[in-house]
Image (tube, grey):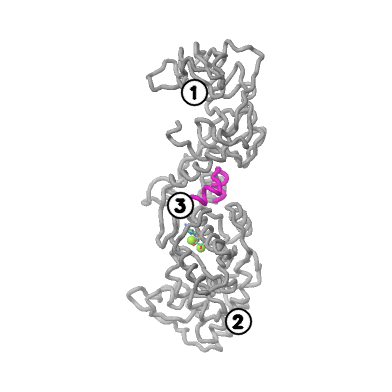
Amino acid sequence: MENHSNFIKTIIETDLENKKHDQIITRFPPEPNGHLHIGHARAIITDFESATAYGGYTNLRFDDTNPVKEDESYVQAIIKDIKWLGYEPAQILYASNYFDEMYDRAVILIKKGLAYVDHQSIEEIQNTRGNINQPGKPSPYRNRSVEENLSLFEDMRNGKFEEGTCVLRAKIDMESPNMNMRDPVIYRISFAYHHNTKDKWCIYPMYDYAHPIEDAIEGITHSLCSLEFEDHRPLYDWVVKETEMPKIPRQIEFGRLNIENTVLSKRFLRAIVEDHKVRGWDDPRMPTIAGMRRRGYTAHAIKNFILSTGLSKINSTVSINMLEAAVRDDLQDVAYRAMAVLDPLKVTITNYPDDQIEYLETDYHPDKPEMGKRNIPFAKHLYIEKEDFVLTKPNKKYKRLALGIEVRLFHAYFIKANEVKYDDQGNIIEVLVTYDPITKSGSGFDDRKPNGTIHFVEASTAQKATFNFFDAMIIGDDSMELLDRFNDDSWHVKQGYVEHDLINFKPQDKFQFIRNGYFNVDDDSTKDHLVFNEIVQLRSSYK
Ligand code: ATP
Ligand code: MG
Ligand code: MG
């Protein structure tokens, strides 16, 4: 991968020149409360690329300090997604493993007179914090003695208080222009079961207190995070300093990635999974890594897309077209070529021998012989797309089949339509054609030009297949409630046919179905029931 320069790398290079660090260590710190989405891919790529570019390493650390929302299944899903993106964490760690040290460091704060137990309710604390124009009102418990605080904090830990009855607050500055510095809560009581520490704790540290300690314990040199943490940096630095951490990490913020008409929020994505609006976190419509993988986006394309969006100190919103273009660029190289008929119409070649079948050898990829060869069956009965036939050629631009008109079948012969058969309702159900044996593809025949080239599948060997098509999952505009913007009509299914040999492929194999688009073999596809997901349409100029 190219070495994409950015402002973070510039900072790291300066730190290395100044011998501030021997080795660059970063971390990716997801909360295990949902699956990763494409926004997280920016953070992952930034964290890993910033360290590996300088011979350093990256930890995966689960920020599991909030027991109520977290679950072990998300831990496994996150590990899988990061590996799929192509990154190998140096260590897989849990913030909850540091709970003892965090507790001890809170005791240090108390002893220094820098933390106190507050019996006000969360509402009272919020209501007395003041605002930008108004200083906060000190808690009546703010000036209790170190001894009292030490024993109350121990009581909190030992389960002597009920949830919501008290918290531990840092004692910083109730008049700070930065609201985060107005005596933030650093510990709260919760009797919830924790997936890692089980019932050991009934007090849990708040993110702003826990995160800097986690970073410092692991010797993280550059703690990279998205822009919304910028205002939290003074508190981050305060915690590292006042808890007397021996190593000092530096927080650097970068802009969040947003995609137009796409909601990158685990909370929202979780809501639509739990409401069964989608078929799961890996529903191909989801902007999750798992959803994109199932749809057929490649890790390589996702990485290229993220790097092409650049990295800066402002949030950016990019068009989904940019992501799709990156996907197409990659699929162009890696997708097998084959033929699929999505909306079949029967074709019978009246001058082709009844029991004959021939095999037309061709490549799975025109530029990549290493992707192998395939034998396309050809015989008397075929399927073509319904939309590739009309009774009368409507105009000069029409480059498909019509009565009296001759077209080429890809990799095969010219056929000319002579007659149609109808059902009782008057629908065309079959086209009778003749073929010309001397026009065989590859024979060099060029005495006359066909009226275009269309694709087909031989009928007796054709494999039935289900094709899934996806539209935007989110429609409408920002004035609407998010859940109301879910597009219930965003999944369409077609039943058609593919070439016989496609039964030999497995989930995640990718195809360019000639003239139809790029498709991925779905995770639930089997030899007996082939299922393909449309990944992305072909470039419009291909049609
Ligand atoms: P969400 O709001 O979707 O729940 P989060 O930020 O709460 O996401 P975390 O698990 O805390 O989710 O995220 C891990 C890391 O990923 C954080 O450092 C966060 O800054 C980063 N991140 C999350 N979303 C984006 C995004 N859209 N662009 C860039 N970085 C992101
Ligand atoms: Mg978060
Ligand atoms: Mg968030």
Q: Quadrant of the C terminus?
A: top left
**Viewer-side residue, 244 vs 309:** 309
Q: Which residue is mark 1?
A: 453
**Viewer-side residue, 3 vs 92:** 3
Secondary element at image label 1: strand
- Residue 318: % across, % down: 41, 51
Q: What residue do we see at 50% from left, 87% from top? A: 144
**Which quarter of the picture shows residue 335?**
top right
The residues colored magenta run 289-305
Q: Is mark 3 within 8 Å of ligand 1?
A: no
Looking at the rendered structure, the kind of residue marked 1 is: Thr
Q: Which residue is mark 2?
A: 154
Q: What residue do we see at 47% from left, 73% from top? A: 122
Q: Which residue is mark 3?
A: 308
Disc 3 crowd, CA 10 A, few/some/many (<14, 14-19, 20+): few
First reached walking from the N terminus: tag 1 or tag 3: 3
